[in-house]
Image (spheres, rainbow, N blue to C red):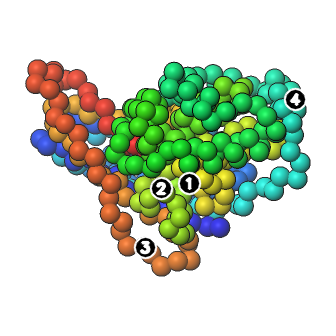
Amino acid sequence: MAYSVRHITRFKYEPAVRESVMEVRMQPRTDARQRCLSFSLDVTPRASMMMYRDFFGNAVHHFDIPGQHELIEVAAQAVVEVLPPLVAHAVGDWEELDARVAQGDYWEMILPSLYARPTELLEKLRERLDLKRRGNPVELQQEWNTQMYEFFEYAPNTTKVDSPIDEALESRQGVCQDFAHIMIALVRQLKIPCRYVSGYLFHEDAKDRSPAGATHAWVEAYLGELGWVAFDPTNNLPGCERHIRVALGRDYADVPPTRGVHKGEAGSELSVMVAVSPVDAPEPADLPAVRVTRSKRPNGTASSDFDQQQQQQ
């Protein structure tokens, strides 16, 4: 299936800031599961763009806007071909998985990371859901995916971009970013490599809990002979050709769609618009933007300091 993806992010500042430095992860990956056929990235105000590949092979574009500005708009446009997932003809057992993990280099996807680490509340959830090794790894992951979907409520704006998993665990609600972090932390406790995936989901019907018009996040677990297998706990979905992969990492800290700093004391507003459609479909109308209003920097903060700016998934 081939998709057209538009992803527009706007940062508005009041008053104007003096300088912004930003990096962007919006270019879909090209690998065995999908191909990025075309990609363009436009920035307003105009800025010189540079690109590199990070440690995980993600495309990272970065730029610097040195002059005063009240608005930054980052507009990404891509055409991506996504292949159907491979059908599992054979499912290995735990011994086979352990042997393959021992032979490979998966430590970064097994050890705790910034947003995916054990806590007391996570341990209580593990005990409540009786999450332990049984059956085979694939069936267990499918079971956990469904249990996560049933246990948590999808509730936008209940957590922040840097919220620890305990906030979602305590309230039993959050967004896809929270659910991915919780599932990763649980899976890694059983010595299964698990990683965070940032990208987009094509919404073909109304059954998905995550909304259209936003980025998406899910997980991939390493399951031996099957390789990395995707699970979407937000929507109780296995990885499918509706999932468009942009970046991979240990957790959200490795793969935010935008991350940067600006110089100057200012209030800011972030708005995001994402549109995903089949390439042969009519051009979709603009979707309502997701808006986040940030508070003004406290008085007394030096104007030469930098404020962080990034978007939640």
Q: Earlier in the sequence, mark 1 or mark 2?
A: 2
Q: Are marks 3 and 1 in contact (CB under 8 Å)?
A: no
Q: Tell me the crowding category of disc 4: few under 14, some 14 to 19, or many 20 or more residues within 10 angstroms, Cα based.
A: few
Q: Tell me the crowding category of disc 1: few under 14, some 14 to 19, or many 20 or more residues within 10 angstroms, Cα based.
A: some
The quadrant of the image that shows the C terminus is top left
Q: Earlier in the sequence, mark 4 or mark 3?
A: 4
* Residue type for callout 3: Pro
Q: Earlier in the sequence, mark 3 or mark 1?
A: 1
Q: Are marks 1 and 2 in contact (CB under 8 Å)?
A: yes
Judged from this view, the residue extending furthest toward the front is 128
* Residue shown at 36% from the left, 37% from the top: 160
Quadrant of the image occupied by residue 133 = top right
**10 or 251, which lies in front?**
251
Q: Which residue is mark 3?
A: 284
* Residue type for callout 4: Glu
**240 or 309, which lies in front?**
240
Q: Earlier in the sequence, mark 4 or mark 1?
A: 4
Quadrant of the image occupied by residue 163 = top left
Q: Which mark is residue 202?
A: none
Secondary structure beneath dot 2 equals loop
Please tell me whether residue 86 is drawn above or below residue 21 in the rendered image. below
Q: Is residue 263 left or right of residue 217?
A: left
Q: Which mark is residue 95?
A: 4
